[in-house]
């Protein structure tokens, strides 16, 4: 049984709706303040693990891996741009560039 389904059966659909409505009514109007409150709630380790399991947010380790992958891709892009052929005499560079960009 999924986590959400377990909550719905425990509280009932009406209870879940009422709880969500009450929480949203107490949030501030401005998105910045609302985001700050949600951020502090998500920082809880248990809540973060549940949200990670549901696919709503990513863990700190996955975030670091994603940042590393983005850095690697940016480095590859820079190297590919340096390989871009500038003249007809650079056939090796052109062949390397064409093989990477295909």
Image (spheres, grey):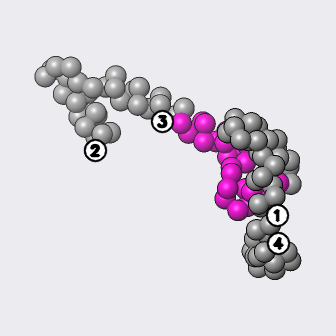
Instruction: Tell me the distance, in whole angstroms, between the alpha carbons under discs 2 and 1.
Output: 53 Å
Q: Nearer the viewer, mark 4 or mark 2?
A: 4
Please name whichever residue, 12 or 87, is drawn nearer the observer in this view of the structure: 12
Q: The C terminus appears in which quarter of the rendering?
A: top left
Q: Is residue 56 above or below residue 69?
A: below
Q: Main secondary structure of the magenta part?
A: helix
Instruction: Tell me the distance, in whole angstroms, between the alpha carbons under discs 3 and 2.
Output: 16 Å
Residue tagged 4: 15
Instruction: Tell me the distance, in whole angstroms, between the alpha carbons under discs 4 and 2.
Output: 55 Å
Q: Which residues, given as a range, are shown in magenta?
A: 47-70
Q: Earlier in the sequence, mark 3 or mark 2?
A: 3
- Give coordinates of residue 77: x percent, y percent: 41, 31
**Visible in this render: residue 96?**
yes
Residue tagged 3: 73
Residue tagged 2: 102
Residue at (61% x, 36% y) in the render = 67
Q: Residue furthest left?
A: 88
Mark 2: give few (<14), some (14-19) or many (20+) Cα within 10 Å: few
Please name whichever residue, 44 or 20, is drawn nearer the observer in this view of the structure: 20
Secondary structure beneath dot 1 equals: helix
Asked if the residue under mark 1 is in contact with the one under mark 4, i.e. CB atoms within 8 Å, the reply is yes
Secondary structure beneath dot 2 equals: loop
Asked if the residue under mark 3 is in contact with the one under mark 4, i.e. CB atoms within 8 Å, the reply is no
Q: The N terminus appears in which quarter of the rendering?
A: bottom right
Residue tagged 1: 19
Q: Is residue 17 above or below residue 65?
A: below
């Amino acid at each position: 049984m999924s986590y959400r389904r377990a909550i719905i059966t425990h509280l009932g659909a009406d209870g879940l709706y009422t709880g969500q409505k009450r929480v949203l009514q107490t949030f501030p109007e401005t998105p910045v303040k609302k985001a700050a409150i949600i951020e502090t709630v998500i920082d809880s380790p248990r809540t973060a693990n549940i949200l990670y399991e549901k696919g709503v947010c990513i863990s700190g380790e996955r975030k670091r891996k994603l940042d590393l992958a983005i850095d690697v891709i940016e480095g590859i892009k820079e190297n590919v741009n340096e390989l871009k052929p500038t003249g007809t005499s650079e056939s090796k560079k052109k062949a390397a560039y064409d093989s990477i960009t295909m």
